[in-house]
Every structure is written in structure tokens, then in C-alpha cells.
Image: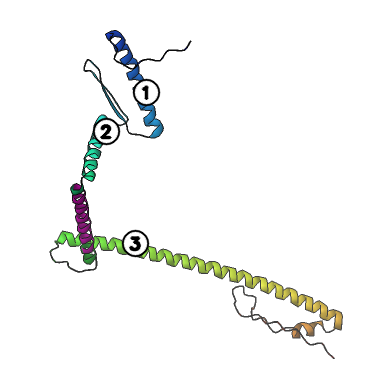
């Protein structure tokens, strides 16, 4: 048979009440630990027994939990009060206004304006800040120039490879032309055909030359 439903009311027997308190207190603390771990919740638990003894558990610390609770309670009360809410927004606006003024003043000083009232130490700090900023700008500039140079080098190597491939194709076409000329005119005029078949390449055997290559087939004799 299953257990009967327990009536939720004060236990008169002091011994039974103490035993029930001990068991349920341990179960409550266990559930609080599981909730803190599973749900990443910040939990604070304080229990006073009927004899006045304190039992507590906190996922962080009881002090931080109580401080957070008090802060949240004060902010909640201020937000529910229209006058307090207006004061809060005015204070935030004043803080933002002061930050804007400080940024504007710092910008003018970096531009070399309104330097009156600054001490030698303040001017030295401002100079160091400008040097650090200038150093960062120069490093960025050098990096961009290096990237552009590397890109141009890669493009030049690619063009050089294409030039070599074209040179090979031209030599292959020249050989085919010589063979064709040999078949048409025989072997007696191969030397003359070789001499008159093409205009000089303008490469002169140098790999780095960029002179244009001109190809011209000879006209067959009548």
C-alpha cells in the first residue's frame, strides 16, 4: 500500500517535529544546490529553527546575495515612484553630459587647442599619447604598403609565368612552321625559311624581358 497524504499542519510532538525539520531542511538545501548548478542561479537560503538556530546556504555568499537583494529592492521602489524615476533619468543625463564635455575637451587638446591650464606633467602625458597614436598609424600604414607590395609581386610573378608560357608556345609554333615549310619546299631552303620565317622576338633569351613578341609567317614562293 502507498503512503497516505500528510496533512500540512504544525506537528505537536516536539521529537517528531525536530526529526521532520532536520529531514526537510536537508532536502530543501539539496534542491537549492541542484537549482543553482542546473540553472546557473544565484541562491541564498536562510533557515531559523524553532529553537532560534540558524542554517544557511548560498551559491556565492549570503552577504553578496543580501546586498543584491537590497539593491534590487531599492531600485524597484524608485522605479515604481514617478518622482524617483525622474531623478534617476536626470542623474543619468547629467553623467552623460559630463562625459561628453570631457571627450570634447580631450579631443581639442589632442588637436593642440586649449592647452592653457595644463601642467608640464599633463603636457608630457598628452605628448606620449600622441606619440603612441602616431606610432599606431604608422604601423597600420606600413602594413597596408607591405600588403600592396606583396600583391604586386604576386601579380608580377604571374605575368612572368604567362610570358614564359607564351614564349614556349611561340617556339612550338616556330618548330611546326619549319616542319610545314620543309614538307612544302623540301630540305634545301630550310635555312632560308628559318631566317625569313619570323621577325626577331625581342626576348634575346632573357627570362625577365618584357618586350612584345611578334610572329610573322613567311609567304610561300610562287
Given residues 146 and 185, the one toward you in this image is 146
Q: Is residue 202 above or below residue 95?
A: below
Along the horizontal axis of the image, is 219 left or right of 55?
Answer: right
Number of numbered tags placed on the structure image? 3
User: For numbered disc 1, what is the local secondary structure?
Assistant: helix
The image position of residue 44, as x and y in percent, is 29, 29
Residue furthest toward the left? 117
The image position of residue 38, as x and y in percent, is 41, 31
Identify the residue shown where x is 28% and y is 8%: 13
Along the horizontal axis of the image, is 191 left or right of 78?
Answer: right
Q: CA distance from mark 2 to mark 1?
A: 18 Å
Given residues 122 and 198, the one toward you in this image is 122
Question: Dividing the picture into quarters, in which one does residue 171 lie?
Answer: bottom right
What main secondary structure does the magenta stretch of the protein show?
A: helix
The image position of residue 83, as x and y in percent, is 18, 49
Q: Which stretch appears magenta?
A: 84-104
- Please identify the quadrant where the C terminus is shown: bottom right
Along the horizontal axis of the image, is 60 left or right of 84?
Answer: right
- The answer to whether one can see residue 187 in this image is no
User: Residue beneath label 3, please?
Assistant: 136
Along the horizontal axis of the image, is 212 left or right of 48?
Answer: right
- The answer to whether one can see residue 34 in this image is yes
User: Residue beneath label 1, please?
Assistant: 30
Identify the residue shown where x is 63% and y is 71%: 162
Q: Is residue 76 above or below residue 161?
A: above
User: Residue beneath label 2, please?
Assistant: 65
User: For numbered disc 2, what is the local secondary structure?
Assistant: helix
Question: Dividing the picture into quarters, in which one does residue 113 lie?
Answer: bottom left
Amino acid at each position: 500500500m502507498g503512503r497516505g497524504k500528510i496533512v500540512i499542519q504544525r506537528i505537536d510532538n516536539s521529537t517528531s517535529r525536530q526529526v521532520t525539520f532536520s529531514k526537510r531542511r536537508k532536502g530543501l538545501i539539496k534542491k537549492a544546490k541542484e537549482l543553482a548548478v542546473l540553472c546557473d542561479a544565484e541562491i541564498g537560503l536562510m533557515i531559523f529553527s524553532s529553537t532560534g538556530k540558524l542554517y544557511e546556504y548560498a551559491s556565492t555568499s549570503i552577504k553578496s546575495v543580501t546586498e543584491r537583494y537590497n539593491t534590487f529592492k531599492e531600485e524597484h521602489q524608485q522605479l515604481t515612484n514617478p518622482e524617483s524615476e525622474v531623478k534617476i533619468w536626470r542623474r543619468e543625463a547629467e553623467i552623460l553630459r559630463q562625459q561628453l564635455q570631457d571627450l570634447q575637451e580631450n579631443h581639442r587638446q589632442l588637436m593642440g587647442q586649449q592647452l592653457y591650464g595644463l601642467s608640464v606633467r599633463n603636457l608630457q602625458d598628452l605628448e606620449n599619447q600622441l606619440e603612441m597614436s602616431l606610432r599606431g598609424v604608422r604601423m597600420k600604414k606600413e602594413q597596408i604598403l607591405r600588403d600592396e607590395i606583396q600583391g604586386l609581386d604576386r601579380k608580377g610573378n604571374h605575368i612572368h609565368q604567362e610570358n614564359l608560357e607564351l614564349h614556349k608556345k611561340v617556339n612550338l609554333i616556330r618548330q611546326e612552321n619549319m616542319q610545314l615549310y620543309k614538307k612544302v619546299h623540301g630540305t634545301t631552303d630550310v635555312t632560308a625559311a628559318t631566317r625569313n620565317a619570323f621577325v626577331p622576338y625581342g626576348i634575346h633569351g632573357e627570362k625577365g624581358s618584357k618586350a612584345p613578341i611578334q610572329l610573322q609567317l613567311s609567304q610561300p614562293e610562287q
